[in-house]
């Protein structure tokens, strides 16, 4: 028959020491701390999501165009309407509080109804501006691009040499002095093609070039080249 060691039994039944009790309680304290940290993170996440929703839903009053405004035309108070929209990255519409500063400025391009108004669409310079003249020229289909012109387009008016009876440049006038010259201009307005296909274009040119453009246009010696779209 085996003999039970008394000292082994006493050691097994002895109460735990302070060190062992402390170690036993450590995992529980750590789990409580992690749980509290998780609760804090959840609360912070909820608050952040709420703020994003609230801010995303906030609208502000901005200026928009109520009806079509021609290029160069002065902005009237009746041309403006206030709409409430959310702020967006990269979008810089004019606040409604600046309405008084906008009225009286000029459209730097054609403005269409419902368009949010930005500073890039405005200019303080009328058309024609100081030192400019507004001239109407009639061009045949071959004297301008097939794509429709838009007010505000930057163009070059090329003065071509006179043509002979066959409609080609006259070789007797092909001297260096008769080579094509270029006159910068800005499109101020256009009309639809007439029954003969010709298009009438209003262009703003420097005062010094006005008489030349008018004379060359009357002689049919202007070719319009677009350099920059509005």
Image (cartoon, rainbow, N blue to C red):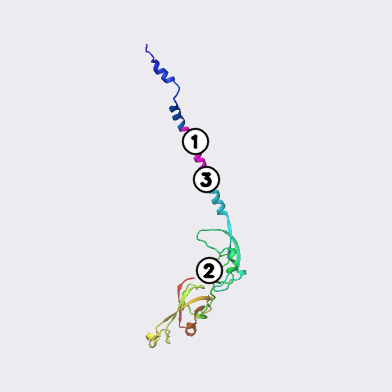
Circle 3 Cα neighbour tier, 10 Å, few/some/many (<14 / 14–19 / ≥20): few
Whole-number angstrom distance, CA of label 3 to CA of label 2: 43 Å
The residue at 58%/57% (across/down) is 59
Segment colored magenta: 27-44
Outermost residue, bottom side: 172
Labels 3, 2: front one: 3
The residue at 53%/44% (across/down) is 43
- From this viewpoint, is residue 197 visible? no
Outermost residue, right side: 78
* Image quarter of residue 114: bottom right
State the count of labels: 3
Find out whether residue 105 is within the magenta segment. no
Labels 2, 1: front one: 1
Residue to which mark 2 is pinned? 121
Residue to which mark 1 is pinned? 32
Whole-number angstrom distance, CA of label 2 to CA of label 1: 61 Å
Q: Please state, as top left, top right, bottom left or bottom right, where the N terminus lies in the image.
A: top left
Q: Which mark is residue 44?
A: 3
User: In this view of the protein, which residue sits in the foreground, 229 or 149?
Assistant: 229
- From this viewpoint, is residue 11 visible? yes
Which label's residue is closer to the chain start, 1 or 3? Answer: 1
The residue at 52%/40% (across/down) is 39
Q: Where residue 198 appears, x then y in whole percent?
A: 51, 79
- Contact flag, marks 3 and 2 (Cβ < 8 Å): no
Whole-number angstrom distance, CA of label 1 to CA of label 3: 19 Å
Find out whether residue 41 is within the magenta segment. yes
Which label's residue is closer to the chain start, 2 or 1? Answer: 1
């Amino acid at each position: 028959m085996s003999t039970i060691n008394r000292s082994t039994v006493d050691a097994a039944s002895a109460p735990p020491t302070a060190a062992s009790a402390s170690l036993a309680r450590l995992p529980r304290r750590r789990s409580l701390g992690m749980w509290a940290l998780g609760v804090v993170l959840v609360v912070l996440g909820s608050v952040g999501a709420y703020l994003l929703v609230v801010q995303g839903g906030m609208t502000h009053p901005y200026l928009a165009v109520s009806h079509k405004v021609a290029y160069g035309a002065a902005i009237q108070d009746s041309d403006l309407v206030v709409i409430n929209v959310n702020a967006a990255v990269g979008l810089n519409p004019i606040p409604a509080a600046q309405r008084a500063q906008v009225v009286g400025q000029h459209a730097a391009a054609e403005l269409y109804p419902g368009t949010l108004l930005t500073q890039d669409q405005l200019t303080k310079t009328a058309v024609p501006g100081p030192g400019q003249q507004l001239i109407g020229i009639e061009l045949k289909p071959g004297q301008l691009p097939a794509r429709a012109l838009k007010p505000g387009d930057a163009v070059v008016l090329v003065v071509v040499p006179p043509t002979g009876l066959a409609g080609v440049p006259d070789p007797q006038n092909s001297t260096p002095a008769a080579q094509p010259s270029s006159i910068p201009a800005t499109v101020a307005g256009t009309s639809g093609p007439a029954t003969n296909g010709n298009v009438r274009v209003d262009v703003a040119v420097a005062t010094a070039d006005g008489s030349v453009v008018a004379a060359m246009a009357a002689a049919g010696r202007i070719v319009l080249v677009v350099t920059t779209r509005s």
